[in-house]
Amino acid sequence: MQNVQDLLWIQIFGAVGTVAGAIFLIAKFVVPALKRISKWMNTWENFMDDWFGEEGRPGVKKRAGVMERLATLDHELKPNGGGSIKDAVNRIESDVKELSSDTKGIKKRLEDGDKRFDQIEDRLNKLEDK
């Protein structure tokens, strides 16, 4: 009878040890793994929401997906008759060319004026010397 009781105690301690080991294994390895998987899944879900966009809901506006936003950007990079960034850049370039041409003309007139002024000054000096 003593052997049976000893065997029963060994089985109880073995079962308790197995349960304690299982709890330790779960706490040490399974829970952290589940946390990492959960974090990765949340990251993936956020990426997918950003990629495909989100529908509006009460208190939150609709958010366009990546492809819709790229289409908008693509539209801005092509001339469309005045409203795109490309059209604005073309207008600015044209204005800069015109201003550059005007500046060259003004510079030439100033140089011509300096020459005429020097000629007039030389003539005045000659008249004063007489």
Image (cartoon, helix red, strand yellow):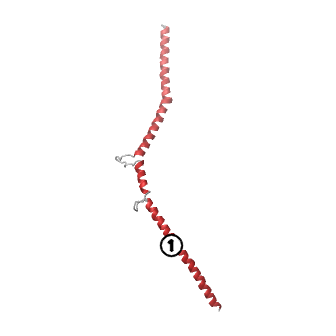
Q: Position of residue 50 (x, y in %)?
A: 42, 45
Q: In screen coordinates, is 128 left or right of 97?
A: right
Q: Residue at x 50, y 72 (%)?
A: 102
Q: Position of residue 45 (x, y in %)?
A: 42, 41
Q: Is residue 95 above or below residue 3?
A: below
Q: Residue at x 60, y 82 (%)?
A: 118
Q: Residue at x 40, y 45 (%)?
A: 52
Residue at the far left: name it.
Answer: 58
Q: Position of residue 56 (x, y in %)?
A: 35, 47
Q: Is residue 51 above or below residue 107?
A: above
Using the image as rendered, state which of residue 73 and residue 61 is in the foreground: 73
Residue at the far right: name it.
Answer: 129
Residue at the far bottom: name it.
Answer: 130
Q: Position of residue 20 (x, y in %)?
A: 49, 23
Q: Amino acid at mark 1?
A: Asp
Q: In screen coordinates, is 30 left or right of 119?
A: left
Q: Where on the picture, by quarter, is residue 110?
A: bottom right
At label 1, counting other C-alpha atoms closer than 10 Å, the crowd grade (few under 14, some 14-19, many 20 or more) is few
Q: Residue at x 46, y 62 (%)?
A: 89
Residue on which the image places disc 1:
102
